[in-house]
């Protein structure tokens, strides 16, 4: 396992999750207030999942070196 | 000149979307972005599985080069084009540009950095006391903070704004211009990192 590679991916992924989480909470509040359509919140969820897939694949590389 | 709300009601492809819904092309562009964005980590996995230095070098150079080229294009070309457009036109560009780059750019950046570390380790150049490696790390850290701290949140905010029942076109245009201006700053740092990479490749 490549520790340095894994650290980089975890830092990238962690930062991504933290920022996405924060913005998702704001979006959820807008959704509950009726400002944001359900389409928007659904797409945002897919966007988060998509980014996580990319980082999961990248995380896998740390175990290949 | 038409007002912003009128102009926003007219754009092509939006009529079928309905109030508060994202334009239909948003999903298609986002899926395209994901399909392209998932390629770099997969190629990196293949290269590492084959234990191929050639593929590893290829992935690092193409991802880093494309990332640099994109930032240079955005900073030097797109920023000028956007400034020449009126707000509704800028919004129309932002509505298409944001989903198209949403997965591609973070993927290129993350794969360029990760493959760069693997490559430096493979070539026995990953020495954290080497000033050139430290310089590369500092520039990458700046690029990453800008990317995760400004680019991506702005992209998400544009999405959220677009999905609102009453999108604020000024806000969309402003956020997109922020990203494009920042691309210019990123382009300057990208040139610096290319100088560092050229040094590391030769010496």
Image (cartoon, coloured by chain):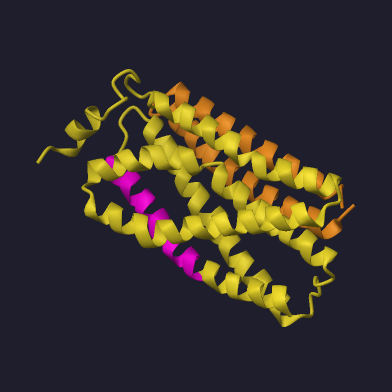
Shade representing chain A:
orange
Left or right: B163 with respect to B134?
left
Left-right relation of B46 to A54? right
In the figure, the shade used to draw chain B is yellow
Q: Main secondary structure of the magenta part?
A: helix
Please name the residue shown 73% across and 51% down the image.
A9
Q: Residue at x 52, y 42 (%)?
A: B102
**Percent of width and height locating residue B43:** 72, 44
Q: Residue at x 58, y 59 (%)?
A: B65
Q: Is A47 located above or below residue B121 in the figure? A: above
Above or below, A37 against A52 in this view is: above
Whether residue B184 is in magenta: the answer is yes
Q: Where are the magenta residues, as a range?
A: B169-188
Q: Quadrant of residue A37?
A: top left
- The residue lying toward the viewer, choosing from B22 and B119, is B119
Compare residues B191 and B23 and report the one nearer the observer. B191
**Which residue is nearer to you in this view: A38 or B118?**
B118
- Residue B175, position as x, y percentages in the image: 38, 50
Q: Residue furthest left?
A: B1
């Amino acid at each position: 396992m490549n520790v340095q590679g894994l650290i980089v991916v975890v830092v990238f992924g962690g930062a991504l999750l933290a920022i996405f989480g924060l913005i998702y909470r704001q979006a959820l509040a807008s959704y509950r207030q009726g400002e944001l359509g359900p389409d928007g919140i659904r797409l945002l969820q897919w966007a988060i999942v998509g980014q996580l897939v990319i980082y999961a694949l990248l995380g896998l590389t740390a175990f290949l070196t | 000149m038409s007002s912003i709300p009128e102009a926003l009601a007219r754009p092509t492809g939006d009529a079928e979307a309905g109030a508060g819904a994202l334009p239909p092309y948003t999903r298609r562009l986002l899926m395209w972005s994901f399909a392209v964005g998932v390629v770099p980590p997969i190629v990196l996995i293949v290269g590492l599985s084959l234990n191929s230095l050639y593929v590893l070098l290829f992935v690092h150079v193409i991802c880093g080069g494309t990332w640099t080229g994109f930032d240079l294009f955005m900073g030097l070309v797109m920023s000028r084009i956007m400034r020449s457009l009126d707000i509704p036109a800028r919004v129309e560009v932002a509505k298409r540009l944001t989903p198209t780059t949403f997965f591609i750019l973070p993927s290129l950046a993350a794969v360029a950095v990760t493959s760069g570390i693997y490559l430096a380790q493979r070539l026995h150049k990953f020495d954290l006391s080497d000033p050139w490696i430290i310089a590369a790390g500092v520039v990458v850290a700046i690029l990453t903070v800008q990317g995760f701290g400004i680019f991506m949140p702005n992209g998400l905010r544009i999405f959220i704004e677009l999905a609102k029942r009453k999108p604020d076109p000024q806000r969309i245009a402003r956020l997109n211009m922020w990203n494009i201006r920042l691309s210019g700053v990123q382009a300057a740092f990208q040139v610096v990192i290319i100088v560092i990479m050229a040094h590391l490749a030769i010496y």
